[in-house]
Amino acid sequence: MTKTYLQAVNEGLRQILTTIPESYILGEDVGTYGGGFGATKGLVADFPDRVLDTPISEAAITGVATGSALLGKRPILEIQFSDFLTVAIDQLVNEAAKIHFLSNGEQSVPMVIRAASGSGTGASSQHSQSFENWFAHVPGLIVVMPSNAYDAKGLLVAAVKNNNPVLIFEPKSLYKTAMPVPSELYEVPIGQAKVVQSGCDITIIALGRMVEVAKTVASQTDISIEIVDPITISPLDSETLVASAKKTGKVLILTEAAKRSGISGEIFAQLVEAGFSGAIKRLGGHFMPVSAAKSVELAQVPTAKEVLATIGTMMEEV
């Protein structure tokens, strides 16, 4: 059955609450209002004691979730905009991510943080940032970014079952996109990249909403493009990325997050360290705050036109 990204997340949350009794949802406006974007719509009516509205304090939400996870619960936090993770960074980075290590493996923090991420909705500088680069740098955190409705539901289920803190960055510009999504409960493996489309001339490694940009580009050219979606940013499935790179001999890495000091540089380095000697280029977000002006915002991240031009140049290179 065809479902939007948001509908798939909502269905996944409902099935998790139904089948995993330790799970519960907490966050700002997740109850009657149904969440900032509607992901928790209707859930509080059926699970009134397990869908909890909280005060406007991301630090408190994350602290409560961390404590309850230590006591055997499996909390699912909603952070309305990933930008607001900055308010909870102490609880997330200095506490939740470290407890398993500091307890010598005796304790774990099985919690999930959902965060609407990225640009494309005209939400301006403080509601449009892409912070996956930051959190991929933190040992103890699992960081994933589903690029479609199918992966969004399956990764959510896998994340709730994981015994570590999992941060899910959901590109909010994709919330209305739709595709066939199974009605039954299923998992998408964490730590496993996906070859979205096979090709032989060049590999595009694309994260989040950039997967759709890559697919658009592939439909507009005769160049045989292989598209690989890492899905999990930390831990990164280097084996799949390296195999595709060596197959085609050319790689373009696409990210919405700022290119400077970003995950694209890490992917670049891992390809080189694995012995890949072909051409590699990166395209990413401009190093500037995201603008509320639509024309500027759209130009701040890689466009299909820019990707096509870059690929054309790469194919001309020997």
Image (cartoon, rainbow, N blue to C red):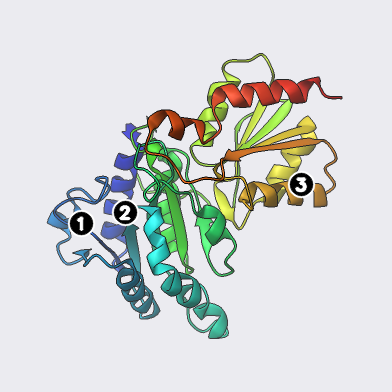
Q: CA distance from mark 3 to mark 2?
A: 34 Å
Residue corresponding to mark 3: 271
87 lies above or below 13? below
Mark 2 and mark 1 in contact (Cβ < 8 Å)?
Answer: yes
Q: Quadrant of the N terminus?
A: top left
- Of the numbered discs in the image, which one, if any, rests on residue 80? 2
Vertical arrangement, residue 118 with respect to residue 61, above or below: above
| Location of residue 188 in the rendering, given as x and y in whole percent from the top left corner | 49, 48
**Percent position of residue 202, x then y:** 72, 28
Residue in view at x 52 percent, y 35 percent: 301
Describe residue 62's horizontal placement relative to residue 167 as left or right.
left
- When asked about the image quadrant of residue 191, the answer is bottom right
Percent across and percent down for residue 116 are: 37, 49
How far apart marks 1 and 2 lie (CA) works out to: 9 Å
What amino acid does circle 3 point to? Answer: Leu
Badge 2, how many Cα within 10 Å: few under 14, some, many 20+? many
